[in-house]
Amino acid sequence: MIPYGTFTFFLIALIVLIPVIILGLFEKRSRIYNGISTAIMIVLIFSSDKHNLFGQTFLSVQLINFVLYLIWQVAIIMFYWKSRSKNNSFMKFFIVITLSILPLVVVKVMQSSWFGTAQLKLHENKVIELIGFLGISYVTFKSVQLLMEIRDGSIKEVKIAKVFQFISFFPTISSGPIDRYKRFVKDETKIPTSENYRVSLNKAIHFIMLGFLYKYIIAYLIQVYAINPLLLDFSNFTAKWLYMYAYSLYLFFDFAGYSLFAMAFSYLYGIQTPQNFKQPFKAKNIKDFWNRWHMSLSFWFRDCIYMRSLFFMSKKRLLKNQFTMSNIAFSLNFLIMGVWHGLEIYYILYGLYHAALFIGYGYYEKWRKTHPPRWSNQFTTILSIVVTFHFVTFGFLIFSGKLF
């Protein structure tokens, strides 16, 4: 069952979480029941009547894949944590990172159209059910982030039970937001007061109502009355231009709605999962946009790809010019982001397009330092928002695969 995809899912989830809510209102927390409720929801999420074992829906291939993957990731993390003081070499770090992302790489290759013959042209969802599971990307991001923080020494304690809980946290398991281990453990360890839990409960209710508005009303109306009609006659320039707007707005309201649901159910557990969107179409430039759009993913790529590649180049002194190394790091960052979405050409072009926007804006910022603006007022602010919006929506048109 797709998380937050049906009203049945919400009904079951809320029933399962009733004891969690009651205990929270009385300043209590049962980690045993939290584990039981998580297990129930994971079985529900990964259950399938198409790919099951021994005729049992709850023994789905996806569920077995998830359990095996969870054991795999926890074993890698705990091995690296236990052996960090003996030999913290880069080679060992490289090996554990490679092993951590290997299942995701296999799934992405199998999903790719480049692998169509070998996989007998299976549908993407069937590939996920047969060799992976829903949300494998976001679970991998959590694991990789934790391994990197262990190497950096920013994490002082790693417990196997907490790692299992962090990786398998069901509200965010399929599409994020991507939480950080230290922040998650801090919330999980601290039991909120009755007053604080009531505030979290009110926020959760607000997120759910707003999520329904975004995902099941606005996104639905955009799809039915804008996207679907435009796709019926997609041969002319005007249709593609209007589709660019419609698809961009649909992406936002659909994904933002999902993220609000994930935050809501996290808050019911007392875990304040970070938000994913912060009025992204009000961004004044491309950097501002990525500080507002899918923020947990954007910050993950910034910290794990951009910053580390830039640090590596600076440490090895590969180039003398810091600005050039930063541009190379941006290019690598967005190229990997594009490839992560898929190996199709339009995803790769989408990543390179945003890399070009970042690099171009970097040159513009350098120019602005010696050429301060003559006017800076409300009109120029609105103009910058409009220009940024159109650059961003054109990128989403590339992302949709409908440009050509």
Image (cartoon, rainbow, N blue to C red):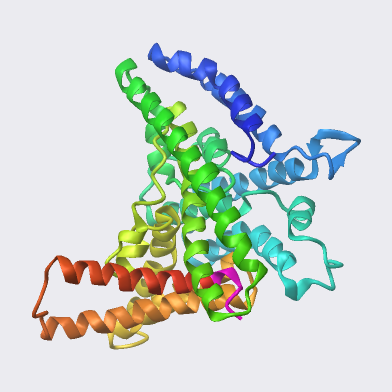
Residue under the point 62% across and 74% down: 234
Residue lying furthest top: 26
Q: Nearer the viewer, residue 381 or 370?
A: 381
Q: Nearer the viewer, residue 238 or 194?
A: 238
Asked if one can make out residue 240 in the rendered structure from this viewpoint, the answer is yes
Q: Nearer the viewer, residue 9 or 129?
A: 9
| Relative to 373, residue 224 above or below | above
Going by the image, does 43 lie left or right of 312?
Answer: right
| Relative to 374, residue 5 above or below | above
Residue under the point 40% across and 58% down: 293
| Quarter of the rendering occupied by the C terminus | bottom right
Going by the image, does 312 lie left or right of 100?
Answer: left
Residue 56, quarter of picture: top right
Residue under the point 45% across and 57% down: 297
| Quarter of the rendering occupied by the N terminus | top right
x then y, percent, for residue 155:
39, 46
x then y, percent, for residue 330:
40, 75
| Relative to 268, residue 115 above or below | below
Asked if one can make out residue 142 in the rendered structure from this viewpoint, the answer is no
Magenta highlight on residue 187? no
x then y, percent, for residue 166:
51, 39
Residue under the point 44% across and 67% down: 305
Going by the image, does 319 lie left or right of 241?
Answer: left
Residue 285, quarter of picture: bottom left
Give the magenta range: 399-404
Magenta span main SS? loop
Going by the image, does 360 lie left or right of 210?
Answer: left
